[in-house]
Image (cartoon, rainbow, N blue to C red):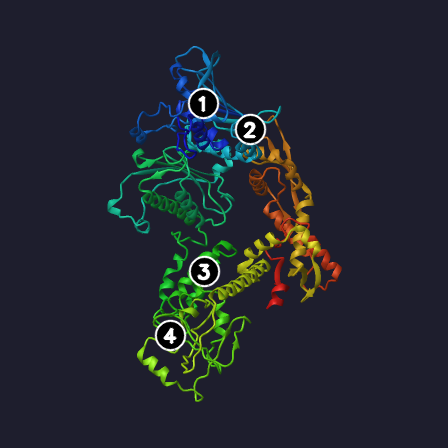
Amino acid sequence: SSSEPAGAIKAIDKHSVHQICSGQVVLTLATAVKELVENSIDAGATNVDVRLKECGAELVEVSDNGKGVEEANFEGLTLKHHTSKLRDFSDLIHVETFGFRGEALSSLCALSDLNVVTCHESSQVGTKLVFDQKGHLVQQSPHPRQQGTTVSLQQLFYTLPVRHKEFQRNIKKEYNKMIHVLQSYCIISTGVRITCSNQNGQGKRSTVLSTSGSQSMRDNIGAVFGPKQLQSLLPFKQVSPTENIIEEYGLKDADLPKQLFTITGFVSQGDHGVGRSATDRQFFFINNRPCDPLKVTKLVNEVYHMYNRHQYPFVALNIAVASECVDVNVTPDKRQIFLQEEKLLLAILKTSLINMYEAGVNKISLNYTPIPSTKPGEAMEPIIQSSKSSLNLASLKAAFSSHHSSNSGSKSNSGPTQKTLQSFFKGSVKTPTSNPSVKSPLKPVKDLAKCSPVGKSVLDGFRYGRTSCAIVRPSVKDETFEEASDNSETVPGDPELQTEPCTSKEDGSESPDAKRARKENPHFPTEHKSKAFLNCSEGSSSSIVDAPVCLQRRTMPLQFSLQELEGRIRRIQDQQKQKASEELCYRRFRAKINPGENQSAEEELKKEISKDMFKEMEIIGQFNLGFIITKLNSDIFMIDQHATDEKYNFEMLQQHTVLQGQKLIVPQKLHLTAVSENVLLENIEIFRKNGFEFLVDEEAQVMERVKLVSLPTSKNWTFGPADIEELIFMLSDSPGVMCRPSRVRQMFASRACRKSVMIGTALSVSEMKKLVVHMGEIEHPWNCPHGRPTMRHLANLDIISQD
């Protein structure tokens, strides 16, 4: 039999397909836990217990008291696309369970060592099931158990070496993401008690999440985030969209389906201080299914920022909609959902939220009443419209001051103000525009950019106004030309290329032959260039070259070798390419010293300057008693003496300062969530370096194990629980990394500024060298804590010498 060709298309073997697809279904620890918890809730469990070892790196175990698995289903439990949730595709429209694809357990078999202990409601004794990587049942034995199911995963992702290594390296981040996903199921699963605990090494098992099985979403929120979070929440009150918002979303009132959406849940109050510093507590559900509806999330945050622009809201919203209007079969984790009538949903949400927050604003009677619109600049629309015909300075001042006074001190406000001013000026200030119908007399030939670089040198010999000119004699049959001359002239730019000059009549008038030629061929002007010259002309030529036609009686053939000309042109091209590459090599720093190019300049410096280069820099001198001029090879740099010293002092304070604490008379409760409490306990040394001391009671119940006993103080600076929460948030993302709350950073920045070399101070060479060397000893030397650049590239001496 003939062997198959090397590139033959063949089916992938089933085992490989299974492994490939499984890696796409379960991507993270969060996905693995989510799939198992969903299975438990789908099985009617009222008690779900998630137990982890080493944050899930060693073991993930989910137990429930659901109805269990019948013996007839043991074999199909972990087979691909085996499910009890649907029989054909049409069932997908009405599916109400979390799972329906029959992929999760099969995929987990391929990624870990999976075993199941289950006891069906009709059975007297439980059964332990062991499965291989293909999902086949390899061992079955009796095992004592109450009704329900326990699924255990050991060594998750060990069958994928690269992912397994990354998973273990980032286990803390994976663990925190998993907790956030689990929180969403805790909130929405009313009537289900969910607990999650973790054990590190041989240490005590600690509970990180626990709900009581309440029938109320509000109680579940309190169980997960503590009673303090409940104090700042508003119940969501749904109202029909207003005409303005219906129009904004391009909807027609008559065509809108009634009662399509029912929205329930809770959002933060709009008062400053009750929101969050990040979007870490935002949970959205569609028909009780946790999901990530991007447009809904964006809208809720935008409306909240109209009332509290510096914080983000706590959100827990469940959107109930007819199942035929939803497609949940979009992504493997089912968190992306397609929704019919999405614009109507957004209109309802926007109107309802504005109504809720406006009611709160009216009660409190704040100075600033937000405009019910998320479009920047809409608040000043009447002024803008009245100003389109003429520039009214008084109106502009009034508009700007009213908008600025309500948002003073906010950097984020600069966007809307700028847009408003642009709108204001749009109608009154004309910007010059080029008229496409008016052609420039100096417009270059269209195809010049594609021509040979040698062209400029050749055409230099044909500049208009010379005492001699090259004769260009057109021919209908060919494109050759002849010249008559006694002397030769060297073409500038190439000593080897020469043209032979001729002289026209002494009085400068045109010869009769030339006149006759122009009459016979009116399309041949005196400014005509032959194709021979067009082919070697350069795009940089700014105008059409005048080449007066000179026709003489005496002619002689031009000695010309195309091969020799081609060789010379190639040599010139090579020279120019080499020069261009050398120039490119020199121009490593292209950003200008301009606030608009700060980011580009920093990127260039990061790329080109390493830490050890600072000590190699030569001090040239001090400029204007504020800037150090240094030289590294051919590059000249300017260094801001105050900004660079401030950044060094700031980083030293950040790294080495241990803040002193002030003891409290009575230990203070912190009302932390179980997750936050664990983050604090795992990073307690970092809190101590920031001046916080705690009383830890390991035996106390979760969320009450830690009490604050000492706060950092420093002269006029005082700190409190808000700074602890900020630190916890930062450490959740970067566990074990030394960090400071933003207010501590502000204090250090202020101290660093005051102790640094000031502008106007004369420095010796050794003092300047010390400041420059210090730049190589810090992590981020490119700008000071207040955002001022420390260093910029001034010039390259090689480029200057060439010019």
Query: Could you give the CA–CA distance between mark 1 and mark 3, rounded to whole angstroms?
Result: 61 Å
Q: Looking at the image, do the residues carrying marks 1 and 3 touch, with CB atoms under 8 Å apart?
A: no
Q: Nearer the viewer, mark 1 or mark 2?
A: 1
Q: Looking at the image, do the residues carrying marks 2 and 4 touch, with CB atoms under 8 Å apart?
A: no
Q: Secondary structure at mark 3?
A: helix
Q: Which residue is mark 4?
A: 474
Which tag, 2 or 4, sits closer to the chain's start?
2
Tell me: residue 117, above or below residue 690.
Answer: above
The percent coordinates of residue 697 (x first, y second) are: 62, 29
Which tag, 2 or 3, sits closer to the chain's start?
2
Q: Which residue is mark 2?
A: 57
- Label 3 is placed on what type of residue? Gln
Q: Is residue 51 visible?
A: yes
Check the picture and name the quadrant holding the C terminus: bottom right
- Label 4 is placed on what type of residue? Pro
Query: Could you give the CA–CA distance between mark 1 and mark 2, rounded to whole angstroms?
Result: 22 Å
Q: Secondary structure at mark 2?
A: loop
The percent coordinates of residue 52 (x first, y second) are: 54, 26
Q: Looking at the image, do the residues carrying marks 3 and 4 touch, with CB atoms under 8 Å apart?
A: no
Which tag, 3 or 4, sits closer to the chain's start?
3
Query: Could you give the CA–CA distance between mark 3 and mark 4, rounded to whole angstroms?
Result: 60 Å
Pick the front one: 115 or 786: 115
Q: Which residue is mark 3?
A: 418
- Label 1 is placed on what type of residue? Lys
Label 4 packing within 10 angstroms: few (<14), some (14-19), many (20+): some
User: Residue at the spot x=50%, y=49% of the render?
Assistant: 310
Q: Which mark is residue 134?
A: 1
Q: Nearer the viewer, mark 2 or mark 3?
A: 2
Pick the front one: 578 or 2: 2
